[in-house]
Image (tube, grey):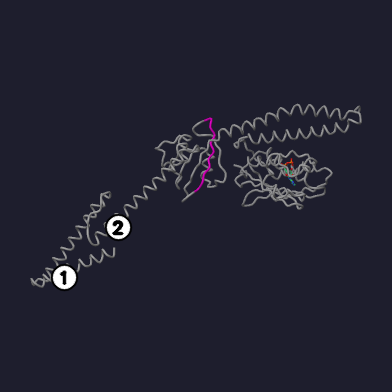
Amino acid sequence: MVRGFSAELKRVLVFAAIGIFFGYINGYMSWTLIATCSLYISGLLWQIRRLDLWLAKPNKQPPDASGIWGTIFDNIYRLQKKQRKEKRELKTVINRVQETTSALRDGVILVDSHGNIDWWNRAAGYLLGFQSADQGHALINYLRHPEFIDYFESGDYKTPLDLPSPRFQSKHLQYQVTLFGRRERLVVVRDVTQIHQLENMRRDFVANVSHELRTPLTVIRGYLETLADSASMPEKWQKPFSQMLSQTERMGQLVEDLITLSQLETQSRQQPQQPVNLQALLHTVRHDALELSGNKRQQINIHSTSEVVITGCEKSLRSALSNLAFNAVKYTPSNSCIDLTLLKNETGIHISVQDNGAGIDAKHIPRLTERFYRVDEHRNSSTGGTGLGLAIVKHALLRHDAELKIESKIGQGSCFTCYFLLAREFKPT
Ligand code: ADP
């Protein structure tokens, strides 16, 4: 470039020298200089025209030129070649990405920052029935399920969402959204029909078996109770009979818990809702817990400043709170203190059940709401638990868009808190 520029400078000087020389000879210095400048400018204009013509057809070789113009043509030509190479490489990468995602069995949809569909792979086209004309349209116009719209617009994509397919009645799809770039979204659509069917089969199986076991167990328990109470019962049979009775009762409790759990799992979220007075419910739960406590003489206190009424299902809420209170009674020693607290503040509605019992090791806490998970098998055989109580609590709360938080310290006690959204509060119309 520097060489081209100095060559151009030399050319200007030569033009100027020629102009001055001829101007001196013919005596018309200014006219001769104007003519020389015009000649030089015409040369510049001609080169600009050549550049313009060449840029209009960029695939052609650059025009031949000397001086600065030769350097300019060469540099532009080199940049064009570099850009063409980069474009080719980028296209190859895009083609490879598209080929790979087309081969995926999961649907992939790219959604721009306005929520419009940018691109989708073959599987997404099949699962959701997209046509090429759908590009650029809002995704929620095609996936209109209210739960999907809430999920998509919430911006909270920690967990995937399972819904029936909008295109095939028999299919069940799972949506997982990931944010990238400038609020663009990648939606992965997975066909989970088989997992869904297996889950339904498991649920139906547990529900049916529990129902089938209920009647024979009631009959067995009835006979055992009659025989155990009978005066003619030989003394050596009294212990085996009372053990049989207590085991039958345990089995009966297990069956009842399984039935409650499967009812909670199968009930739709849109089940009829009614106003539930949480303060009154806590008093009922306290009454039942005191009965269970019996001669352990535990103190059960209610802390609640005002009445809070939410919309929900009283039966499942009672079941959840009773399970928490009964656990506090079961896992705390005699004469201990249990606090049932109801609190409403700007973060939501909180109900906590706190005890000063044995406490739970932190490593167990994340698994406590799993079915049949127990901290200590030995300890539980004496308390008669089924291992389903906290699973029932979790599912009952899920039905109310609520969460369970567990805090516990070995030797100090445990606190189980249920968090409800303020939106749950009942507002009389
Ligand atoms: P279970 O019927 O065995 O009580 P849960 O699901 O209700 O089953 O509880 C799971 C386990 O969590 C219990 O086995 C017990 O070890 C522990 N747990 C629950 N509540 C408490 C509590 N308040 N204090 C100490 N341990 C508890």
* Location of the C terminus (image quadrant): top right
Residue 173 on the magenta segment: yes
Which quadrant would residue 129 be assigned to in this image?
top left
- Residue 81 lies, in percent from the top left, at 32, 52
Q: CA distance from mark 2 to mark 1?
A: 30 Å
The tally of labels here is: 2
- Outermost residue to the left: 26
Q: Amino acid at mark 2?
A: Asn
User: SS of the residue at dot 1?
Assistant: helix
Q: Is residue 57 left or right of residue 203?
A: left
| Residue at x-position 31% and y-position 53% | 80
Q: Is residue 176 left or right of residue 353?
A: left
Residue 202 drawn above or below residue 409:
above
Residue on which the image places disc 1: 17
Q: Is mark 2 within 8 Å of ligand 1?
A: no
* Location of the N terminus (image quadrant): bottom left
| Residue at x-position 68% and y-position 50% | 343
Q: Amino acid at mark 1?
A: Ala
**The label number, if any, that marks residue 277 in the structure image:** none
Q: Earlier in the sequence, mark 2 or mark 1?
A: 1
- Residue 207 lies, in percent from the top left, at 67, 31
Q: Is mark 1 within 8 Å of ligand 1?
A: no
Q: Residues within 10 Å of mark 1 (few under 14, many from 20)?
A: some
Tell me where the magenta segment starts and ends, as one range.
169-179
**The label number, if any, that marks residue 75 in the structure image:** 2
Which quadrant would residue 64 be assigned to in this image?
bottom left
- Residue 362 lies, in percent from the top left, at 70, 50
Residue 206 on the magenta segment: no
Q: Ligand 1 is found in which quarter of the picture?
A: top right
